[in-house]
Every structure is written in structure tokens, then in C-alpha cells.
């Protein structure tokens, strides 16, 4: 028996110019708008249970701010706070949002976005209509690439540069699946829930942009009449758009940026079109399933901290001081390796006096035979693949940066190998495997 209602809403969250943009280890301030930032809200109801899932065009919402979002939305809608998820798309061309910051532009913007999120949640609930759900999977080939590489000197580098002759091989596999949930509603637009895992850091620069997730939503809606699209990012911690060995034509519309990363707005548009192709592969041929029950479950675990060796602190302070003084040219690294050592130094200083453990909160949501697992940071694709294989469901979707932005979750081997993500991670080796284990347990309990 089908007992499902679904609602949708969207709000514009463009910031004032001059606000600081997040996503890099350098200060950028907004000096224009390429395309709109948005908050998209999906309301799902079955019987006396309602779930709210919000997708925010932002690099990542810290846990204390995510908790504030969820509390305010809960107070305004009556939906239980543990049935509300806030996911960041992870665009690197959106404003920073830090609670307690003295910058008035940023503090005012935070309040503006919270209010818009509350409105979107309320409007999504008001938009609830009888619906049926189908799911399907397409593919988006040669978009996402592993960004960690083994080099000829035995080192491991993240984004070592296009056509670098010292690259031996990538480490890991990409997941090119585009997962789709299709909600057909009585007397209202259909809704496409699109899911794909890759870093949205394609645009760069100092102009506001939702990057390819925003362009994807708009492209899907242009191609499919009477349809709204909401996007959720998957396991993207070790993959991005950088093709280090491009075929003829694949570098069109791109340039090599300051950190040896190739970027370009035209490539973000291409990204959107190719993922839309994956959506279209699935859209007409989804498997429709009855939904007579929805459920949510949250779980908090403790993870050991990646505290530094005290002997490394003096060098970390030296690197950090030079970087903060704008003297990167005095640090003996360039491009992405510079970013790596700066991130590692910041991690060491941040954790010099602890804490010894961090708490991570996960959220599981089930919609009939489909499960969604929210992770409060950036999981490697190995986590995503393992979570997708959880038994008991027809489809499992891992979502990154959900109800928190608590850094990278690298696989165990990455710590010995090195690279940007592991060297800057707050967590000791084993965090990925712990997330997989606890995630499968949570989803099993959710399905009972």
C-alpha cells in the first residue's frame, strides 16, 4: 500500500558583495554573482511522520550552526529535530558562515539564511501532495576523477597537476553512478532527487556561484517539463573534477588556477549537462515502489583525534605564521603541496592540546525500500561504496556534509600514504572503517 506525500520549496540566498567566501586557505571576498545560491527543501510525509531534507548551496555548515538551523526549523514547523537534515552541496564559491564571528556582513547573512531555510521548510510542508516514488540509476562518465596519485618518487600527492609526467597512477576508484529518486505528485510538479559524488570546486574565483550543483538543477528543470530538482552530494572526499590526463578537447573551457587545479565556468556547465544525462537515463525507467512507512534515526559516536607529535609543533607554527602573514612564497612548496602543508600545520596547531576524541552524529532516513545515510563531513568514495552495499534496502544513498562539516574521513591506507586529506584530517586512521561499520548498524536498526 502506498501512503506518501511529498512537498518542495526553494529560496534564494544570495549574499551581499564584500562578504568572505569559504573553501580555500586564502581570503576571497565576493565581487559579483555568476548564478544564484539557493536553499532547496524536500518534505516527505507518511501517516503521522514527516521528514525535512534541506540542501544548501554552501561549502559546509559547521555542526553548531547546523544544530541551530535544525532547532529553528523544528520550532517553526513542529517536525522533530531528529527528522531534519541540513546538507551542503559543497560549492567553493559561497560565503563563509561561522557563529560568533564579529564580521557584521557574515553574522547578518547567517540570520538571513536561517530565516530563508525556515521559510523553505514551512513552504515545503504546505506543498505536500499525494505522491508515488520510483528510483533508478544512470551514469556520468569521465567527470569525477580520483585526486590522489602515486608519484615516481614514491610520494602521494593530491591534484599533482594536469599532464604531470611524474604521475604513476591514481589511488582508488571513482563512483560514476547518478542515483535518482522520482516523486510524481497529484496535481503538482514532479520532483527529482539527484545524487552524485564529486567536489564542486570547478568555478573558483571571487564571484558567487552554486557551481555545477546549481547548474544541474536548472538544466534538469529545463529538460524535464513540470519538474523540480533537488541535489544531494555523495561521497566526494577524494574525488574532484581534475582530469590529469585529458583527451583532446577535454580541457576546453578550463584554465590552470593558482593551486595547479584546472577550473572554468564552462566546465561547470558541462558537468551539469553530463549529470543531467545520467538523470535522464533513469528518469523514464524508474522502478516505482510502494511507500507505506518512513523513518529516521540518529546516532552519535566518538572518534579518536589525530593529535600531533609535540616535536612537530615548532615547524607547524613557522608554516602557519608565514601563511597568515601572507608570505607563502617563503614556504618551500607550491600549488597543491603548499595547500597540503598549510592544512597539516593548521591541524597540528588546532589539536595541539586536544581534544582526544571528537563526536560525530549520523542521521539515517528511510523512504520505503530506499535508505539515506547522512555523514557530517567529507567521506572518501570507499565509504560511499561500502554504505551503498548495505543489505536490506533496494537503494542506499550516502550524503556528505549533512548536519555538520567536520572535515575529511580518509580510508585507513591514506594515512600511511599521505596527501592533503589525511595530513589535514582531525581523525586518526580507522575513522572511515568505523563510519562504515556504524553506518551499516544504524541502517540495519532503521530498517527493523
Image (cartoon, rainbow, N blue to C red):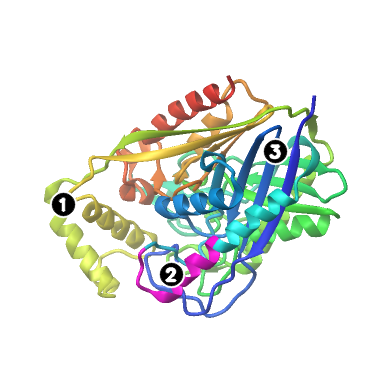
- Relative height, residue 246 to residue 266 (above, below): above
Q: Which residue is mark 1?
A: 312
- Relative height, residue 80 to residue 209 (above, below): above
Q: Which residue is mark 2?
A: 107
Disc 2 is placed on an element classified as helix
Q: Is 105 covered by the magenta stretch? A: yes
Whether residue 248 can be seen here? no
Are the residues flagged by discs 2 and 1 in contact, CB closer than 8 Å? no
Are the residues flagged by discs 3 and 2 in contact, CB closer than 8 Å? no
Instruction: Look at the magenta stretch and give its main secondary structure.
Output: helix
Point out residue 161 in the picture as x, y percentages from the top left corner: 46, 59
Neighbour tally class for label 2: few under 14, some 14-19, many 20 plus, Cα within 10 Å: some
Q: Nearer the viewer, residue 255 or 86?
A: 86
Whether residue 348 can be seen here? yes
Query: In this rendering, which labeled residue sits more in front, label 3 or label 1?
Result: 3
Disc 3 is placed on an element classified as strand
Quadrant for the N terminus, please. Answer: top right
Q: Earlier in the sequence, mark 3 or mark 1?
A: 3
Which segment did they paint magenta? 100-114
Q: Which residue is mark 3?
A: 45
At horizontal 47% and vertical 55% (from top left) the residue drawn is 60
Point out residue 387 in the picture as x, y percentages from the top left corner: 53, 31
Is residue 418 found left or right of 111 in the rendered image? left
Is residue 14 found left or right of 380 in the rendered image? right
Quadrant for the C terminus, please. Answer: top right
Query: In this rendering, which labeled residue sits more in front, label 2 or label 1?
Result: 2
Is residue 428 found left or right of 87 in the rendered image? left
Q: Nearer the viewer, residue 392 or 62?
A: 62
Point out residue 49 in the picture as x, y percentages from the top left corner: 65, 35
Amino acid at each position: 500500500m502506498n501512503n506518501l506525500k511529498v512537498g518542495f520549496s526553494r529560496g534564494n540566498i544570495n549574499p551581499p558583495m564584500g562578504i568572505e567566501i569559504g573553501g580555500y586557505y586564502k581570503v576571497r571576498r565576493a565581487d559579483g554573482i555568476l548564478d544564484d545560491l539557493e536553499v532547496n527543501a524536500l518534505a516527505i510525509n507518511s501517516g503521522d511522520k514527516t521528514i525535512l531534507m534541506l540542501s544548501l548551496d554552501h561549502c559546509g555548515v559547521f555542526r553548531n550552526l547546523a544544530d541551530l538551523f535544525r532547532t529553528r526549523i523544528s520550532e517553526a514547523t513542529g517536525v522533530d529535530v531528529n527528522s531534519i537534515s541540513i546538507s551542503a552541496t559543497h560549492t567553493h564559491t559561497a560565503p563563509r558562515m561561522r557563529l560568533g564571528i564579529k564580521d557584521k556582513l557574515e553574522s547578518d547573512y547567517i540570520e538571513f539564511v536561517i530565516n530563508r531555510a525556515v521559510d523553505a521548510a514551512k513552504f515545503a510542508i504546505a506543498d505536500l501532495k499525494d505522491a508515488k516514488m520510483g528510483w533508478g540509476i544512470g551514469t556520468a562518465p569521465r567527470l569525477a576523477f580520483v585526486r590522489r596519485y602515486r608519484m615516481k618518487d614514491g610520494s602521494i600527492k593530491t591534484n599533482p597537476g594536469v599532464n604531470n609526467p611524474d604521475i604513476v597512477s591514481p589511488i582508488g576508484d571513482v563512483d560514476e553512478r547518478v542515483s535518482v529518486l522520482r516523486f510524481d505528485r497529484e496535481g503538482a510538479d514532479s520532483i527529482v532527487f539527484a545524487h552524485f559524488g564529486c567536489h564542486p570546486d570547478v568555478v573558483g574565483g571571487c564571484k558567487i556561484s552554486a557551481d555545477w550543483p546549481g547548474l544541474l538543477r536548472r538544466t534538469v528543470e529545463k529538460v524535464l517539463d513540470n519538474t523540480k530538482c533537488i541535489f544531494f552530494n555523495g561521497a566526494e572526499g577524494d574525488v574532484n573534477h581534475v582530469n590529469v590526463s585529458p583527451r583532446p578537447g577535454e580541457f576546453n573551457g578550463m584554465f590552470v588556477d593558482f593551486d595547479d587545479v584546472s577550473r572554468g565556468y564552462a566546465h561547470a556547465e558541462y558537468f551539469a549537462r553530463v549529470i543531467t544525462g545520467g538523470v535522464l537515463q533513469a528518469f523514464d525507467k524508474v522502478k516505482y515502489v510502494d511507500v507505506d512507512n518512513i523513518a529516521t534515526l540518529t546516532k552519535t559516536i566518538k572518534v579518536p583525534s589525530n593529535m600531533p607529535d609535540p616535536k612537530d609543533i615548532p615547524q607547524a607554527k613557522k608554516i602557519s605564521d608565514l601563511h597568515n602573514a601572507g608570505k607563502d612564497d617563503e614556504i618551500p612548496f607550491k600549488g597543491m603541496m603548499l595547500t597540503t602543508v598549510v592544512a597539516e600545520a593548521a591541524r597540528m596547531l588546532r589539536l595541539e592540546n586536544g581534544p582526544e576524541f571528537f563526536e560525530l552524529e549520523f542521521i539515517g532516513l528511510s523512504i520505503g525500500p530506499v535508505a539515506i545515510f547522512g555523514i557530517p563531513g567529507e567521506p572518501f568514495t570507499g565509504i560511499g561504496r561500502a554504505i551503498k552495499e548495505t543489505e536490506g534496502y533496494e537503494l542506499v544513498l550516502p550524503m556528505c556534509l549533512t548536519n555538520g562539516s567536520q572535515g575529511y574521513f580518509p580510508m585507513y591506507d591514506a594515512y600511511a600514504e599521505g596527501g592533503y586529506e589525511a595530513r589535514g584530517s582531525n581523525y586518526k586512521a580507522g575513522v572511515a572503517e568505523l563510519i562504515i561499520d556504524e553506518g551499516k548498524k544504524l541502517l540495519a536498526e532503521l530498517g527493523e
